Amino acid sequence: MAKDDHEVDHQAAMKRTGFWGRRGAGCLFYARSTGRFLIAMRSDMVAEPYTWGTWGGAVDGGSSPEETVRREVWEEAGYDEPFELVHVHTYRHSSGFVYENFIAVVEHEFEPALDEETADYMWVKEGRWPSYLHFGMVDLIENVPNLVERVKAASPRP
């Protein structure tokens, strides 16, 4: 499917579900060296502006959620170093929209190169989340109350 076809598909999904695409995927980064998570503030260029959430986007036809996260990490955070992905939660909306949540495990904190979809970022300890969380982020932390333990269990230190 060509890029223009993806845009048409995503726009049609927006009309049906209220979400950009039928499926989405994204992540929080987790730095092993500090035990902190990198969270993104959405810009006024996207829905739910000025709320804190994951780095992510629509899953294009033929792509997996993991491929989507790897693409979005590069596009939205400018991160091009190796990282592990740990799937932690699936958000299901009553409209049929599904969003796969991952943790991108990195060794050290870094400064992301933000694109137009992200207004700001913050490295935080679990439980010290900033105010005005995106509803998807609220769903994630309510359904996975101990993200650090989930990450450590799935991705033990080498």
Image (cartoon, grey):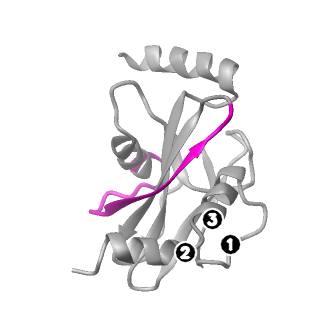
Would you say the residues marked 3 and 1 are in contact, meaning their CB atoms lie under 8 Å apart?
yes
Q: Which residues are magenta?
A: 74-94
Q: Secondary structure at mark 2?
A: loop
- Work out which residue is located at the far right of the displayed protein and give it: 132
In primary-sequence order, the first of circles 2 and 3 is 3
Residue farthest left in this picture: 158
Which residue is labeled 1 in the image?
A: 129
Q: Picture coordinates of residue 79 (x, y %)?
A: 38, 58
Q: Is residue 119 magenta?
A: no
Q: Quadrant of residue 132?
A: bottom right
Residue for point 44% across, 71% down: 150
Position of residue 133 in the picture relative to residue 111 (left or right): right
Q: CA distance from mark 1 to mark 2?
A: 13 Å
Between the C-alphas of marks 3 and 1, the distance is 10 Å
User: Residue flagged by tag 3: what amino acid is it?
Assistant: Ile
Corner quadrant of residue 52:
bottom right
Pointer 1 local density, CA inside 10 Å: few below 14, some 14–19, many at least 20: some
SS at circle 3: helix
Count up the numbered dots: 3
Q: Is residue 82 magenta?
A: yes
- Residue at image position (59%, 77%) is 126
Q: Write the residue at 51% across / 33% down.
A: 23
Q: Is residue 110 visible?
A: no
Q: Which residue position is annotated with label 3?
A: 141
Q: Nearer the viewer, mark 3 or mark 1?
A: 3
Q: Amino acid at mark 1?
A: Trp
Name the secondary structure under disc 1.
loop
Front residue of 39 and 152: 152
Residue 15 point in image, percent of width and height = 69, 18
Question: Residue beneath label 2, please?
Answer: 146
In the rendered view, would you say 150 is above or below 24? below
Q: Residues within 10 Å of mark 2 (few under 14, many from 20)?
A: few
